[in-house]
């Protein structure tokens, strides 16, 4: 091992189980997000005219800002899908400037910004680990309330009389009871939805002996009713884009819908649209307008094209090609599976396609350093779905809680030892391999990742 690496590896182990604290001199520099090319946010190839029409209408709905008359709130995190999913284009992930800061006091609202929401930080949702009685919570606690909001959308003579209080996030933060998450990008999700369960399960058996030697396991999260492999969300808690859309509309914006028809806050005077707020419009003049917003969101994400990697940026073609080989040799591909394939999908645009997602879509124990203490489905408090790496080259905020924008730090945070509550990270051996690389090889690997 080169002598220049030894001090860094010593420092990396100094923080015990939470290695993110060891920020002493980085031996490979994250080149940072690649600039936009203008191609982001388009639809898949080989789509029919009608599919494109539904995609376009879904994109419009995805970008719409919701109002009181639309059913916004009374508790919510943001007022549009694209507000959370805007980097590097509509459908992506958290943008550089956080719109939650402006929305907190828009239209006369008086919300106090929680400490974890900042102008240049990531968009976040908050979950509480425990209830006030000490039992597991895990649910999303909306950041803002619509009390005092007057956005001009209500009918003449109708006033916003809702008077509910914002939750006390300061005390929850002080009690270390808050778990944070940032938005997941939605590019290429229709392709992920079309991967057969059998392909995901078979992939987990490939290279089993080598995985075992590295301490890598992996298991799928499943739908509790039909046993189907769930695959969307940080813990693979959602089985389909329709469920993903309906839940987000209800949880993030407070808009009830046909998937989640009951208001999250049934306080008198706080609802200004019939329940559920979003429904099928049986009287619409066109098929495009008949379907609910939830279905439009799902159409948009289903046909949203995956990210396009770069062959030359950053670092040049040779560095990227070398970094790809290093990605494989250190063992990253055992969880971040480079390619899976779709099956016999209803749309030709999704049928029998290669999906270069860089994920096995399985859950892995990530150790106490990344554990959030939240269980969802079979996923335990230290388990997360392997995050797909396609599009990583243009992401600003990294890891499930957006704690860093530095790719090197994000990689190192994958390693942590058991602490008596959570087991050791399954990535430890692979991150050890990364730490043992020369600075040049590390840089090539970072360049490769940022080319995706």
Image (cartoon, rainbow, N blue to C red):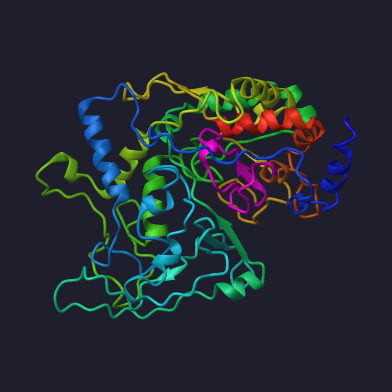
Q: In this view, does 245 lie above or below 119?
A: above
Image-quadrant location for residue 343: top left
Secondary structure character of the magenta stretch overall: loop
Residue 273 appears at what percent x and percent y?
A: 23, 66
Which portion, as a residue range, is magenta? 381-408
Q: Is residue 53 above or below residue 161?
A: above
Q: In which quarter of the image is the C terminus?
A: top right
Residue drawn at point x = 52 percent, y = 30 percent:
357
Left or right relative to 90: residue 420 = right
Image-quadrant location for residue 100: bottom left
Which residue occupies the foreground of this view, 278 or 144? 144
Which residue occupies the foreground of this view, 380 or 156? 156
Left or right relative to 20: residue 292 = left
Residue drawn at point x = 59 percent, y = 53 percent:
401
Left or right relative to 189: residue 269 = left
Which residue occupies the foreground of this view, 326 or 441? 441
Can residue 447 be seen in this snapshot? yes
Q: In which quarter of the image is the N terminus?
A: top right
Residue 338 appears at what percent x and percent y?
A: 58, 25
Residue 277 appears at what percent x and percent y?
A: 26, 60
Residue 107 appears at what percent x and percent y?
A: 31, 72
Image-quadrant location for residue 68: bottom left
- Quick check: is 261 in the magenta stretch? no
Can residue 360 be seen in this snapshot? no
Left or right relative to 286: residue 124 = right
């Amino acid at each position: 091992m080169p002598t220049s690496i030894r001090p860094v590896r010593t420092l990396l182990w100094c923080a015990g189980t939470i290695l993110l604290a060891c920020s002493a001199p980085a031996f490979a520099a994250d080149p940072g997000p690649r600039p936009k090319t203008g191609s982001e946010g388009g639809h898949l190839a080989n789509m029919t005219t009608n599919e494109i029409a539904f995609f376009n209408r879904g994109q419009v709905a995805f970008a719409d800002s919701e109002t009181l008359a639309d059913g916004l709130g009374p508790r919510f995190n943001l007022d549009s899908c694209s507000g959370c999913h805007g980097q590097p284009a509509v459908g992506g992930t958290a943008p550089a400037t956080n719109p939650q800061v402006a929305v907190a006091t828009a239209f006369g609202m008086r919300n106090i910004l929680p400490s974890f929401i900042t102008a240049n930080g990531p968009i976040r949702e908050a979950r509480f680990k425990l209830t006030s009685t000490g039992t597991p919570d895990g649910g999303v606690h909306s950041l803002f309330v619509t009390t005092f909001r007057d956005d001009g959308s209500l009918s003449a003579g109708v006033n916003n009389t809702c008077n509910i209080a914002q939750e006390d996030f300061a005390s929850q933060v002080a009690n270390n009871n808050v778990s944070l998450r940032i938005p997941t990008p939605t590019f290429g999700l229709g392709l992920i939805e079309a991967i057969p369960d059998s392909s995901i399960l078979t992939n987990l058996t490939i290279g089993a002996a080598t995985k075992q030697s590295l301490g890598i396991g992996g298991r799928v999260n499943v739908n509790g009713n039909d046993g189907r492999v769930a695959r969307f969300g940080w813990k693979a808690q959602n089985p389909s884009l329709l469920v993903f859309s309906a839940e987000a509309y209800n949880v993030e914006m407070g808009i009830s819908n046909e998937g989640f028809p009951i208001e999250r806050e049934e306080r008198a005077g706080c609802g200004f649209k019939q329940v559920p707020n979003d429904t099928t419009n049986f009287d619409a003049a066109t098929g495009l307008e008949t379907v609910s917003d939830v279905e439009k969101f799902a159409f948009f994400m289903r046909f949203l094209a995956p990210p396009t990697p770069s062959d030359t940026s950053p670092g040049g073609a040779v560095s990227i090609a070398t970094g790809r080989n290093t990605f494989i040799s250190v063992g990253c591909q055992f969880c971040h599976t480079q390619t899976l394939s779709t099956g016999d999908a209803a749309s030709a645009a999704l049928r029998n396609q290669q999906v270069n997602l860089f994920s096995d879509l399985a859950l892995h124990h990530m150790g106490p350093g990344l554990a959030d203490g939240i269980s969802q489905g079979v996923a335990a408090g230290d388990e997360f779905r392997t995050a797909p790496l396609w599009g990583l080259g243009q992401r600003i905020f990294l890891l499930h809680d957006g704690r860093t924008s530095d790719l090197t730090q994000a990689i190192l945070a994958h390693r942590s030892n058991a602490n008596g509550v959570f087991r050791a990270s399954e990535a430890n051996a692979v991150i050890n391999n990364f730490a043992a690389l020369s600075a040049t090889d590390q840089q090539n690997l970072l360049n490769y990742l940022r080319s995706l």
